[in-house]
């Protein structure tokens, strides 16, 4: 795989993550989770990752 192909793939991945992150941050489930958590504000990226981790752990049961 050529280096330009790898770079363009990473750019697409970042674009997908940014769009997914925005959609999750707007969701009612995420907003409710934020209210229940009541922790110090952090970056949206970090909050979304923690929300997804928590949600997946709950679904794993």
Image (spheres, rainbow, N blue to C red):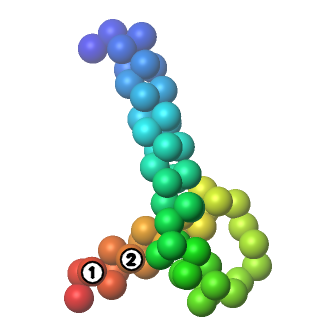
Residue at 56% x, 61% y is: 25
- Residue 49 visible? The answer is no
SS of the residue under disc 1: helix
Say the numbered circle drawn on residue 43: none
Residue at 27% x, 80% y is: 59
Residue 26 position (above or below residue 13)? below
Residue at 76% x, 79% y is: 40
Give percent across and percent down for residue 2: 33, 10
Say the numbered circle drawn on residue 59: 1
Left or right side of 16 for 60: left
Contact (Cβ within 8 Å) of mark 2 with mark 1 = yes
- Circle 1 residues within 10 Å: few <14, some 14–19, many ≥20: few
Q: What is the quadrant of residue 26 in the picture?
A: bottom right
Left or right side of 23 for 6: left
SS of the residue under disc 2: helix
In the picture, the quarter occupied by the N terminus is top left
Give percent across and percent down for residue 37: 62, 87
Left or right side of 39 for 14: left
- Circle 2 residues within 10 Å: few <14, some 14–19, many ≥20: some
Residue at 47% x, 75% y is: 29
Work out which residue is located at the far right of the displayed protein and give it. Answer: 40
Distance of mark 2 from mark 1, alpha carbons? 6 Å
State the residue in front, 22 or 47.
Answer: 22
Say the numbered circle drawn on residue 55: 2
Residue 50 position (above or below residue 25)? below
Residue 37 position (above or below residue 46)? below
State the residue in front, 12 or 19.
Answer: 19
Give percent across and percent down for residue 47: 60, 67
């Amino acid at each position: 795989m050529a280096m330009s192909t790898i770079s363009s793939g990473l750019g697409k991945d970042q674009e997908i993550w940014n769009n997914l992150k925005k959609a999750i941050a707007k969701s009612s489930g995420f907003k409710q989770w934020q209210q229940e958590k009541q922790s110090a504000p952090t970056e949206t990226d970090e909050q979304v990752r923690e929300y997804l981790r928590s949600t997946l752990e709950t679904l794993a049961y």
